[in-house]
Amino acid sequence: ALKQGGAEKNHKTSKNVIQYQDMFRLNKFSRFERSLTALRYFEECLGSEGTGFLVGDCVSFVDFGLFYILFELAEEDNVPDFAEKFDFPNLGAFLRRMEQRPHILDYLKSPRRMPRYQRDDSGASLYTYVAGKYSPEF
């Protein structure tokens, strides 16, 4: 959604979308707007926590979940410059820090990692493996 939405004429950033709390259960928003709003929420959480993590002062399960989403979003065939494009400095810094953690980096480069798979515009999986950062070519 962010890949398609970023090309809209009225370019949106984290500063000019509705608050996540105000969007709850409202379906009039596009996937792009909902995605940008959710990322803005995490951007604000990282900023207010002040530790570089979502909860507390060390990596937690929720940090791994956010990292997984951001790592996929930052792939070359998605929106590799999402942090700059949509004004998410905390998310960009979080992604870089998490990716460089030795155990995470080892896992990303290992054959144990599940390959990436292609999705259509609705987000549904096409179950076709695709190349990506640290992923093998198929």
Image (cartoon, rainbow, N blue to C red):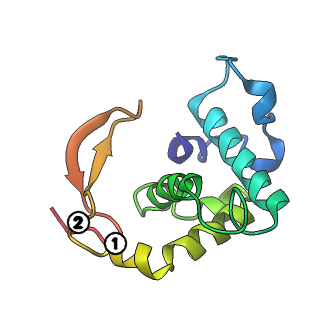
62 and 132: which is toward the camera: 62
Q: Residue at x 54, y 54 (%)?
A: 61
Q: Residue at x 66, y 59 (%)?
A: 85
The residues bearing labels 1 and 2 have C-alpha atoms spaced at a distance of: 7 Å
Q: Check the image and report above or below for 25 versus 102.
A: above
For residue 102, side relative to residue 13 (left or right)? left
Residue 86 appears at what percent x and percent y? 69, 55
- Callout 2 secondary element: loop
- Callout 1 secondary element: helix
Q: Residue at x 53, y 57 (%)?
A: 70
Q: Return the residue found at the far left.
A: 138
Contact, mark 1 vs mark 2 (Cβ under 8 Å): yes
Q: Quadrant of the C terminus?
A: bottom left
Crowdedness near tag 1: few (<14), some (14–19) or many (≥20) residues, C-alpha within 10 Å: some
Q: Which residue is mark 2?
A: 112
Q: Quadrant of residue 27?
A: top right
Q: Quadrant of residue 136?
A: bottom left
Residue 81 appears at what percent x and percent y? 58, 64
Q: Check the image and report above or below for 102 versus 15.
A: below
Residue 115 appears at what percent x and percent y? 25, 57
Identified by mark 2, the residue type is Arg
Q: Which residue is mark 1?
A: 107
